[in-house]
Image: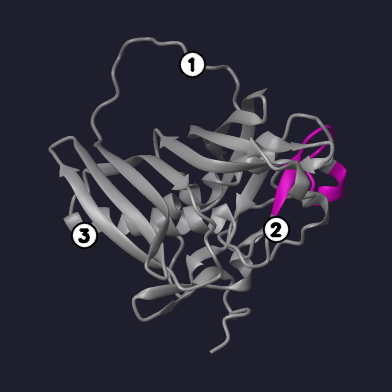
Amino acid sequence: MSHDRPREVAFFVREGDALVPTSVARSSWSASQMHGVAVSGALGRAAERGFVELGRPDLRPARLVVDLFRPALMAPCLFVTEVVREGNRICLVDVTLVQDGRAVARAALTGLAVSATTDGEVWSSPHRPSPPPLHLAPPTDTPHPSYLRSSGDWTADRTAHQNAAHKMSWNSPPGVVAGEPRTPFQTAATMADGSNLVVNWGSLGVEHINSDVTLSLARLPRGTEVGLSALDRVESEGICVGTATMFDREGPIGTVVLTAIANALRTVSPSVVLEP
């Protein structure tokens, strides 16, 4: 059975208990591997389903930590989910991605109980990224290529952003699994790995590959579009720590932190990568 390109744009199709990656999940680093965006989205989906099965609508996904410790291949994926702790105000769910009997990635999702906002005044950053103008990117739930902003205005033309300027992206990604609706949390989990693009894309392309990603959310996005804005970047001897703000049309919703290692011999140039 071929999974080269399903009629619906999604990273995976279901085949029994397994998820089988489509060509949309293929990495630019290697044709035999999946990219981190697909892996992060699939792990987030599995963790979210673990929360749903607990029947705890009072819990909100607040932190997702993804470790990418082996190459995830273009091969069937199984997900092993474990509820580590369920309390009144906190819940932890772990997920392991298994291929051919071997663990290749894992995620830990923390859920926190919602309550009333406190009254005290506390400092917050005045930096408030915003999406592209409506005439360029009207609200949609249909997947589309990302809009980018660096040294100039927002545009979907990636060739305009091969530079060392501050970067932002606006994204409506493919669904995780064909035939399933894209949830707001799945959108956030999917695009968390996309922070590597806004943090580590420079004048020569993306010369770093991330080994992990941590998404912390104060709230879920309103809908299935999210933006990313590079916040900070620190590098020493080939190890980079990058931070990005995740936002929607109403403002910031959380932060992404990733750790990456230099991969200059296999640099990816996003300006020539075609998106689905």
Q: Which residue is mark 1?
A: 124
Q: Give the amino acid at mark 1.
A: Ser
Q: Give the amino acid at mark 3.
A: Glu
User: Element under label 1?
Assistant: loop
In the rendered structure, which disc, 3 or 2, sits on the residue that comes first in sequence? 2
In the rendered structure, which disc, 1 or 2, sits on the residue that comes first in sequence? 2
Q: Which residue is mark 3?
A: 53
In x, y percent, where is residue 40?
48, 52
In x, y percent, where is residue 159?
86, 48
Asked if residue 10 shows in the view, the reply is yes
Q: Residue 261's image quarter?
A: top right
Q: Residue 33's image quarter?
A: bottom right
Q: Most extreme residue toward the right, as rendered?
A: 160
In x, y percent, where is residue 85?
17, 43
Q: Residue 216's image quarter?
A: top left
Work out how far the residue at label 1 is from the one at label 3, CA to CA, in angstroms: 35 Å
Extent of the magenta region: 146-160
In this view, the mark in front (3 or 2)? 2
- Residue 28 is labelled as 2
